Image (cartoon, helix red, strand yellow):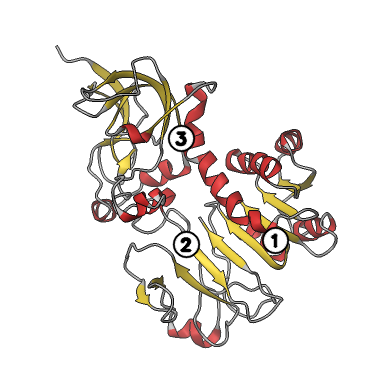
Amino acid sequence: MTATMKAFRLTEWAKPPRLVEVPVPKPERGQILVKVGGAGLCHSDIGMMAMPEAAGRMAGWNMPFTLGHEVGGWVAEAGDGLKGVAPGDPVVLVSAYSCGHCQFCLSGHDNSCVETYAGRGYGRDGGLAEYVLVDSPRAVIKLTSLDPRDAGPLSDAGATAYHAVKRVLPKLTPGSTAAVIGAGGLGMFAIQFLRVMSPAKIIAVDQNPNRLALALASGAHEAVTGVDTFTSAAIKEHSGGIGAEAVLDFVGNDASLEQGLAAVRSVGSFALVGAGARSIAICGPISPRTVSCSPSRAARSATCVRSSRWSRPGWSRTRRNASRSARWRRPIAASTRASCGAVPWSRRTSGNKPAHLRERQVRASHCSKNHLDDCWAI
């Protein structure tokens, strides 16, 4: 008789998931069966529940599948031919799938793998179940002191915050300031990374006084209640009146974008990580720090490009110049070019590609010292 287990699965496109009974998978040669100790529920899991069939199939997803890409547990069984892992070993699983042999994987850029658009928990069976099957030992990280029941979110939420912090580290010299908008799960990771990895003064921004208290206990130097119309002024007050060298926005709504961009000093960096609903106008000569997704003359402060090779409707391939590789630039409507009006910055969960696999990068031009040096979105 085949053993069964409970699993939280998407069984139909654009329908809510269901808790169902499925067979416990059996590892084949080179595979590992992991008994799940804990699995994180990510914002992108919510977005997957509304994934249209056409978009999912374009990404290579197979329906049905079990959700859960932030997974920790213990090795239950190893397939033939595996060394270095044994039943009972505590492990955490790498969140994003990668093949391990393409150009990107071999150069250490696993998240850009050509096969990364479908993986464990997004198009294939994940860890919101009693057991999860791992295709390769390269996706398994053995733990020493961490409890696998708590380690799962580090593979995605923790890694996302680390990625954001690492990109702004060159700006964070002694005497600099970094502001973290949103002291929730990812924001709290960022505060801790900033404290350990940089000498910067850290400002935490949140509406919840309990979160602000935890942020101060976790490494923040200052706490600001917000986001409101006074948030950017408060950040500047704590950064010598000139703004922060880096602002990391883990909220991602209209208010946090507006106040966060206004709080960045000249030649500073702004990172958009949060996936809140937003429709803020990011085109036009609103201020010296305007970020534009328009190639029009009226909006000369920035160019919006994609660093991914992944193509989707509404994006056209261009070359910025002969010395740079091909990028993806989104065309802008003629009416928008003429007026340089509002260009909605869609939610991170929109489009055909899974949210936690996409990165939109906005590079500001260097034509004026008043422009942002770097502005990008995860």
* Nearest to the observer: residue 364 or residue 141: 141
Instruction: Give the spatial CA distance, label 3 vs label 2.
Output: 23 Å
The reply to whether discs 1 and 2 touch (Cβ–Cβ < 8 Å) is: no
CA distance separating discs 1 and 2: 20 Å
Return the residue nearer the eye: 81 or 62.
81
Q: Position of residue 262 (x, y in %)?
A: 71, 65
Q: CA distance from mark 3 to mark 1?
A: 29 Å
Mark 1 is surrounded, within 10 Å at the Cα level, by few (under 14), some (14 to 19) or many (20 or more) other residues, namely many
Q: Which mark is residue 259?
A: 1
x and y percent of residue 329 in the render? 42, 73
The residue singled out by tag 2 in the image is 360
Q: Earlier in the sequence, mark 1 or mark 2?
A: 1
Q: Could you tell me if residue 340 is visible in this image?
A: yes
- In front: label 1 or label 2: 2
Q: Earlier in the sequence, mark 3 or mark 1?
A: 3
Residue 44 left/right relative to 123: right
Q: Are marks 3 and 2 in contact (CB under 8 Å)?
A: no
Foreground: 99 or 185?
Answer: 99
| Res 253 visible | no
**In the rendered image of this protein, does residue 29 appear above or below residue 175?**
above
**Residue found at x 43% / y 48%:** 356
- Numbered disc 1: secondary structure: helix
Q: Secondary structure at mark 2?
A: strand
Q: Quadrant of the N terminus?
A: top left
The amino acid marked with disc number 1 is Gln
Q: Quadrant of residue 256?
A: bottom right
